[in-house]
């Protein structure tokens, strides 16, 4: 009997030992599995799988975070069984490992670099919910104290957890003064009213040519000005948004497709604004103390220099430029000297004697001979020029224009110290034959100065891509796309579009009339100078 009892005790001990061993194995397995799951769940970036609690460092619930929220976690130094709660970066909040799923990256909302944080904090000691894009993002049981980035009539906006979040205004929220930023915000914003922006304006002072508008905006950008939206402007006026200096607000009375395309192309904001709220007095907008908003009216005679002064907030009173102001653009071709036994039977050949006669007349009568850069700035309204201004152009680069084919043009320009522009067929002759401080070289195509199968100039007979390819080759040689000249004065819509798309600012044709600021910038007229021209005829052209 004693032996049986003894054997039973041994069996019980063995059984208990085995059970303990099994339990220890199960615990170890469970712990290993838990560690594996913890390790599997942790990542720098995670997403919340379902609406779930967030915890403080003592693992007590302090709020709720909502499904779909993306977060960045603090680096986990060591994986162990205590690390079942991961810390959310830049907070004292923790999230349970089973409530999250790892993702490769998160979408981070960036603050607008032109905004300056308000020197006010919002504070509440009661339960509060933060929203992202009108969806619940985070609820905190004991409130929050954060800098206000900006606000509107219904919400505060704060930057928290790598996101711009909104908090609905309520009586439970206090606004506290706080020095959040030492940066100085702007006190005024220039409102630029463009009545209409169009490709063709037909002598309407309040209509701005597309290219003029593009040049104005590009110059403003070069000087670090930036555009704001109507909402931002209204928040600025109501002191709910602080903006850095050099903010401008562009508005139009005609927000048509053309204007929308330009705004997208230039990456700027253009809005419509109620005309009844505008005071067109050429002063910057400052506050809502007045019933109307101070506004600048941009005219087609507004120069680039004045646009910059307007953006700066200066009081500019502009006067219309005389509608009669015109510039004669002279178009020469070939030059030769009969006294040296040279001959030329072309109707566009001119003797050096006649060319000197023309220049002497211009010099003696105080004409301003423009550079191509001056002419371009003038036609775009950036500068004014004297009434008696002319532009000298030469086409092709053939007889007498280069150092290799007679060298008549350049010595005369250098002798009189006057500027001219040569439209060179870039693929036909070496550009180095025409180098001079007094001769600007521009494109006359690469190899399209010939008639095409359609019976017109090859540039017109070619399709858009062919034309653009040729023009690009000419630019690779010439390196300057300020102006262009159509071979045989022949153009069509596709040729003009190719020229525009390659960044040319202006283009010349024929026409036998003077250029004005209202001329189509891509069909600027010129006077072809023929061999039989008399001095009296020349005087009529330039006067």
Image (cartoon, rainbow, N blue to C red):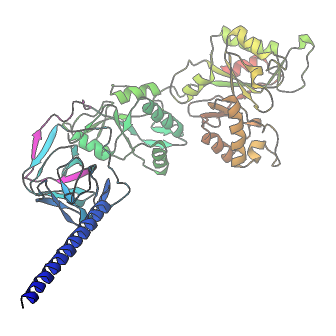
Q: Quadrant of residue 489?
A: top right
Per the image, is 426 magenta? no
Q: Position of residue 474 (x, y in %)?
A: 71, 34
Q: Is residue 360 left or right of residue 256?
A: right
Q: Is residue 531 left or right of residue 198?
A: right
Residue 87 vs 66, above or below: the answer is above
Per the image, is 177 magenta? yes
Quadrant where the N terminus is found in the figure = bottom left
Q: Residue at x 15, y 58 (%)?
A: 55
Q: Residue at x 85, y 27 (%)?
A: 347
Q: Residue at x 75, y 36 (%)?
A: 446
Q: Residue at x 73, y 33 (%)?
A: 444
Q: Please provide the residue range marked out in magenta.
A: 164-186
Q: Position of residue 72 (x, y in %)?
A: 29, 52
Residue 146 vs 224, above or below: the answer is below
Quadrant where the C terminus is found in the figure = top right
Q: Is residue 127 left or right of residue 358?
A: left
Q: Assign the magenta stretch its main secondary structure.
A: loop
Question: Is residue 357 shown to the viewer in this render?
Answer: no
Q: Name the one closer to the observer, 256 or 202.
A: 256
Residue 290 vs 366, above or below: the answer is below
Q: Position of residue 38 (x, y in %)?
A: 27, 62
Q: Name the one closer to the observer, 295 or 483.
A: 483
Q: Position of residue 201 (x, y in %)?
A: 52, 40
Counting labels gives 0
Residue 407 vs 425, above or below: the answer is above
Q: Quadrant of residue 184?
A: top left
Q: Residue furthest bottom?
A: 1
């Amino acid at each position: 009997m004693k032996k049986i009892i003894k054997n039973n005790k041994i069996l019980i001990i063995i059984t208990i030992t085995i059970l303990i061993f099994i339990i220890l194995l199960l615990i170890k397995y469970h712990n290993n599995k838990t560690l594996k799951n913890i390790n599997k769940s942790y990542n720098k970036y995670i997403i919340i799988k379902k609406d779930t609690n967030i915890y403080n460092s003592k693992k007590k619930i302090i709020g709720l975070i909502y499904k779909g929220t993306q977060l960045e976690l603090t680096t986990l130094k060591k994986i162990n069984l205590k690390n079942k709660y991961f810390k959310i970066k830049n907070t004292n909040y923790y999230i349970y490992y089973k409530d999250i799923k790892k993702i490769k990256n998160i979408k981070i909302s960036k603050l607008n670099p032109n905004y300056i944080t308000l020197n006010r904090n919002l504070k509440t000691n009661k339960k509060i919910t933060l929203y992202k894009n009108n969806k619940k993002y985070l609820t905190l049981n004991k409130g929050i104290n954060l800098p206000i980035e900006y606000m509107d009539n219904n919400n505060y906006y704060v930057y928290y957890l790598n996101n711009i979040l909104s908090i609905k205004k309520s009586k439970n929220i206090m606004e506290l003064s706080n020095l959040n930023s030492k940066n100085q915000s702007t006190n005024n914003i220039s409102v630029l009213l463009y009545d209409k922006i169009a490709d063709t304006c037909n002598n309407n002072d309040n209509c701005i040519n597309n290219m003029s508008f593009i040049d104005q905006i590009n110059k403003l950008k070069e000087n670090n000005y930036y555009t704001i939206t109507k909402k931002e402007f209204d928040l600025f006026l109501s002191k709910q948004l602080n903006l850095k200096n050099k903010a401008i607000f562009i508005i139009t009375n005609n927000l048509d497709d053309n204007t929308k395309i330009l705004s997208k192309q230039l990456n700027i904001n253009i809005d419509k604004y109620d005309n009844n709220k505008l005071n067109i007095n050429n002063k910057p907008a400052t506050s809502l103390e007045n019933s109307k908003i101070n506004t600048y009216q941009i005219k087609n005679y507004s120069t680039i220099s004045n646009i910059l002064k307007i953006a700066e907030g200066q009081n500019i009173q502009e006067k219309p430029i005389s509608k009669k102001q015109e510039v004669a653009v002279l178009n020469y071709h070939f030059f030769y000297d009969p006294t040296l036994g040279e001959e030329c039977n072309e109707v566009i050949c001119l003797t050096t004697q006649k060319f000197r006669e023309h220049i002497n007349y211009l010099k003696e009568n105080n004409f301003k001979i423009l550079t191509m850069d001056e002419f371009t700035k003038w036609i775009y309204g950036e500068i004014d020029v004297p009434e008696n201004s002319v532009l000298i152009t030469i086409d092709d680069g053939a007889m007498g224009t280069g150092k290799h084919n007679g060298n008549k043009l350049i010595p005369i320009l250098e002798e009189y110290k006057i500027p001219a522009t040569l439209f060179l067929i870039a693929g036909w002759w070496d550009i180095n034959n025409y180098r001079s401080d007094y001769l600007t070289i521009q494109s006359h195509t690469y190899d399209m100065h010939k008639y095409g199968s359609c019976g017109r100039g090859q540039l017109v007979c070619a399709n858009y891509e062919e034309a653009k390819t040729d023009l690009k080759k000419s630019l690779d040689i010439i390196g300057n796309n300020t102006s262009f000249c159509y071979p045989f004065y022949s153009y069509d819509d596709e040729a003009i579009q190719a020229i525009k798309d390659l960044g040319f600012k202006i283009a010349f044709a024929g026409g036998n009339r003077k250029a004005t600021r209202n001329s189509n910038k891509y069909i600027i007229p010129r006077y072809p100078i023929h061999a039989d021209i008399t001095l009296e005829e020349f005087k009529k052209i330039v006067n």
